Image (cartoon, rainbow, N blue to C red):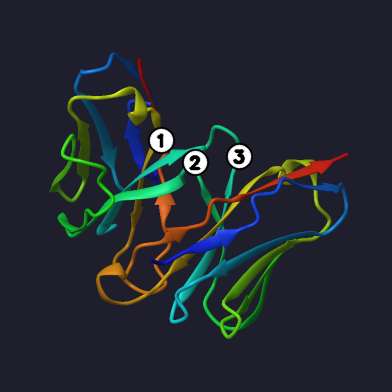
Amino acid sequence: QKEVEQNSGPLSVPEGAIASLNCTYSDRVSQSFFWYRQYSGKSPELIMSIYSNGDKEDGRFTAQLNKASQYVSLLIRDSQPSDSATYLCAVNPGRGSTLGRLYFGRGTQLTVWP
Amino acid sequence: DAGVIQSPRHEVTEMGQEVTLRCKPISGHNSLFWYRQTMMRGLELLIYFNNNVPIDDSGMPEDRFSAKMPNASFSTLKIQPSEPRDSAVYFCASSRGRGTNEKLFFGSGTQLSVL
């Protein structure tokens, strides 16, 4: 069973603060990791991907990966009310019959209040 | 690029009726996925095609569900007969292939309500 676990939240932060979203996964040989944002009533939208240990920055978003700890996180700096959404962590195990498919966590609901 | 196109956007039907959901993947993408999303279970993979061939259908709930991909630009998910517990949002997604770093792109989804 390939599990992806996220804190369901809700996570509530004030505008301008840093929001920290966390994800752990069970398959230790997983290869690639993604963060999707899903607004209420909309489809998931890819916002970050990370494949190597360390940090990857894209604008206000930073993804962090630690394969030894089987942990991936997403930091949102200078949070805005428009960041209010559910954030889904996804993992690609990258081998065998599972190659190419993603396993999703249940998502963390983020609210940024003005 | 038009993205992944799904139809219909909303479907309301009565228990026992047949439901057909449709999907057109992004041109050039070789992998297609059908997901179901509910509050209780989150996003669940139902079936996964690569080059029009089903690779993994272990997520298909039961025989009432079937999926086809007759060509690279079209797929259907059929529920027959439908039941109230099938009510959910059904997403189709596509990616370029079966690589390790493939990124998944979702359609707008079909909101299914079975009364």
Percent across and percent down for residue A83 are: 72, 46
Badge 2, how many Cα within 10 Å: few under 14, some, many 20+?
many
Q: CA distance from mark 2 to mark 1?
A: 7 Å
Contact between labelled residues 3 and 1, with CB atoms less than 8 Å apart: no
Contact between labelled residues 3 and 2, with CB atoms less than 8 Å apart: no
Amino acid at dot 2 = Ser
Please name the residue that numbered disc 2 is placed on: A43
The residue at 64%/50% (across/down) is A8
Q: Chain under label 1?
A: B
Please name the residue that numbered disc 1 is placed on: B109
**Residue A85 circle label:** none
The residue at 62%/77% (across/down) is A65
Report whether residue B27 is seen.
Answer: no
Contact between labelled residues 1 and 2, with CB atoms less than 8 Å apart: yes
Is B69 in front, or is B80? B80
Badge 3, how many Cα within 10 Å: few under 14, some, many 20+?
some
Please name the residue that numbered disc 3 is placed on: A39
